[in-house]
Amino acid sequence: MLKIGITGAGVMGNRHQERIADYRAEVVAVHDVHLPAAQELATKGGAKVATDDLEQFFDVEMDGLVITTPPPVRLEPVRRACERGIHLMIEKPPALNMTEGRACLAQIEEAGVIAAVSFQLRYGSIYERLKELLADETVHLVHTVCTVDYYLSFRMSPWFLQRRISGGPIAEQAIHILDCARFVMGNTKPVQAHAIGAKNMAPDRTEFDAENALQMMYELDNGVFGTHMNHCGTKGNGFELEVIGPHLRLRADAQGGRNGDRIVGHLHGNEFNEPVPTENSLGLDKYHAWLRAIETGDRSLIRSNFEDALHTLALVEAAVTSQDTGGFVKVGSSPIE
């Protein structure tokens, strides 16, 4: 039975624990800076160790470590895990910025551990099928949308809406669907990005400075131009993704209701309306794919390894930086080097 540790005992830590239990792996230790949170998750998952002390946490033997801490807390747990040969599952974003991301990657590559980043959309059957459809097609434009209800419900960890911790809505929310856009087009890399945004909701909540409305433009190295809209004060949470080219206009309808998820639009002059299966071709979600990869050593099960995830982070960082500079920000030709 695989032995797994979790650092970060919030909502995502609990979600990972549930999927780990479904795989019949064992959570052996939980760490959180708030000891009661660690104790509660440890009790729920049957872990023998609950601690706010990293030294005590890493004294426990484990095969894998799940990191669901806020983005500024990546490098230290990654370093300690790599020193011990512990495989990693890291929540998005892979790091707060590219400087820390490169430092984490250096540790991961030296240790040779399996390091997955928690981009679950890459395991969605609808996006797997869209990627297949686009494999031999020309795409010129991609448009994505992300909506959440944070500024209406405030049912989230407060740091989600604090830019210095979360990086703002591009890093905390949009990153999922931006990464998915890269995925369906064959892991394309960013060239440049620009974003504008405003916080014009909840003026009385001065502790929050993350924008609720944001518009982004970017370029990928396959010649595709992308746009993204983000709103984190809208009733109803969801993602949208649409691609347009000379012979196609396809939309991933991931909220198909009773009709299920579908890909709809036009392809080579014909109306296109195709249902997609519930499961992807692996029959595994991001959690179980990572656990299976640890068991078998099959790294091909990981659809978002840490190195590739840094290209998505580079796109995010360029967009966030542009909000301060007021213009397009170029991404280096090799942002992970």
Image (tube, rainbow, N blue to C red):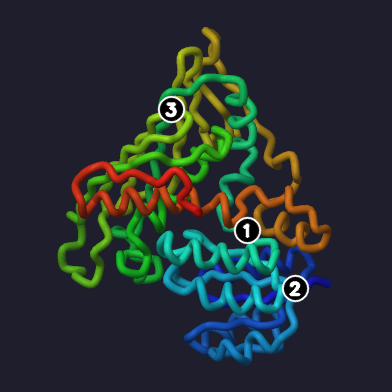
Q: Do the residues labelled 2 and 1 touch (CB within 8 Å)?
A: no
150 up-or-down from 164: above or below: above
Left or right side of 186 for 212: left
Question: Distance of mark 3 from mark 2, alpha carbons?
Answer: 41 Å
Query: x, y percentage for residue 73?
Result: 47, 74
Residue 168 rendering spot, x and y as whole percentages: 33, 59
Of 111 and 73, nearer the camera is 111
Q: Which mark is residue 316?
A: none
User: Farthest residue in the top direction?
Assistant: 269
Q: Name the residue under label 2.
A: 63
Q: Mark 1 points at which residue?
A: 116
Question: Tag 2: residue type?
Answer: Asp
Residue found 39% across the figure and 66% down from its top: 155
Q: How many labels does the image show?
A: 3
- Residue at the image position 27 percent from the left and 53 percent from the top: 212
Q: Quadrant of residue 25?
A: bottom right
Q: In the rendered structure, which disc, 1 or 3, sits on the residue that comes first in sequence?
A: 1
Can the viewer see residue 258? no
Q: Can you say which quadrant of the picture contains the N terminus?
A: bottom right
Tell us which disc is closer to us: 3 or 2.
Answer: 3
Q: Position of residue 296 (x, y in %)?
A: 83, 58
Asked whether the viewer can see residue 276, the reply is: yes
- Chain-order first, disc 2 or disc 1: 2
Of residue 288 and residue 301, the one placed in the foreground of this image is: 301
Q: Tag 3: residue type? A: Gly
Badge 3 is on which residue? Answer: 223
Q: Report the amino acid beneath label 1.
A: Ala
Disc 2/disc 1 C-alpha distance (Å): 14 Å
